[in-house]
Amino acid sequence: METTTEKESRYNNLEQMTVLEILENINKEDQTVPLAVAKALPQIEKLATVTAVKMKDGGRLFYIGAGTSGRLGVVDASECPPTFGVPFDEVVGIIAGGDFAIRKAVEFAEDDANQAWIDLAVYNINEKDVLVGIAASGTTPYVIGGLKKANENNIVTGCIVCNAGSPLAAAAKYPVEVVTGPEFLTGSTRMKAGTAQKLVLNMLSTCVMIQIGKVKGNKMVDMQLTNNKLVERGTRMVMNETGLDEKTAGTLLKKHGSVRKAVESIKN
């Protein structure tokens, strides 16, 4: 395979650039990322479709990764409960080295090909679930090992990688390959590759949640009311759906705990 994520930057003598030149060139590279993601839409569609089917049947979505990739998976998983009202164990992000590695790198954690399956076993992962491995290079032993063991246990596997023809893509039943090319800072895959992975994760989780009924119209009707901003947003949603005044809508929302339940209480 050709590791384009590790190729030499198209730019040199970065330290001699002005601040504006650095920013302009990073921005120029960033603009190529959505185009790379667009090429992978058919692959993302397949992964999102099978994930939605599994989750409708009671399955869960797991992400595993190391470093930036692992952190991005944790972020996406962490945002699903407040955004869509799903249980905290329905979308799970696991990073090599454990939660400590979210803030501080754990040396060589990504090189253990057996540890991912040990980490996943804590959650009793099974054939009803979906496992997505995230690795910019597509060569991370922790992630590859996890997917291979999942395959042996008849679990649906997918991946998000930024090189073509990687070992991780070969191990995944539903690979997503977003080839972002060389980074502005050579090998710094937290940049374009990380942006691409974040875009794909946004697409995957949002599409799946829509498919399993967690969105109505264009609204997050099951979002958790965890701060004043969200309570105000939820109140407006109830007002729009029912025609109630703000005070009544707010009272109804607080009573039922979600936009969906508040609206259903009126319509039923």
Image: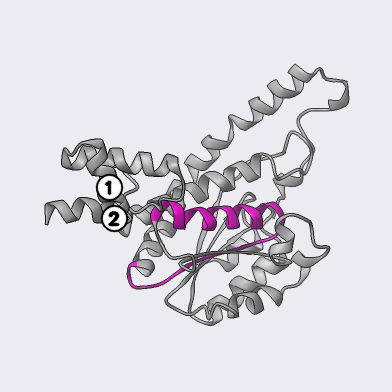
Taking the image as shown, residue 66 lies to the left or right of residue 11, namely left
For residue 255, what is the image quadrant?
bottom left
- Position of residue 8 measured from the top left corner of the image (x, y, whole percent): 79, 38
- Position of residue 166 measured from the top left corner of the image (x, y, whole percent): 65, 58
Above or below residue 247? Residue 148 is below
**Residue 68 lies within the magenta run:** yes
Q: Which residue is mark 2?
A: 255
Q: CA distance from mark 2 to mark 1?
A: 6 Å
Q: Which residue is mark 1?
A: 251
Residue shown at the point (70%, 44%) measured from the top left:
190
Which kind of residue does numbered mark 1 sit on? Thr
Taking the image as shown, residue 257 lies to the left or right of residue 4, namely left
Which kind of residue does numbered mark 2 sit on? Lys
Quadrant in which the N terminus appears: bottom right
Circle 1 Cα neighbour tier, 10 Å, few/some/many (<14 / 14–19 / ≥20): few
Front one among 215 and 34: 215
- Position of residue 241 measured from the top left corner of the image (x, y, whole percent): 20, 42
Taking the image as shown, residue 224 lies to the left or right of residue 16, namely left
CB of mark 2 within 8 Å of CB of mark 1?
yes
Above or below residue 136? Residue 107 is below
Extent of the magenta region: 56-84
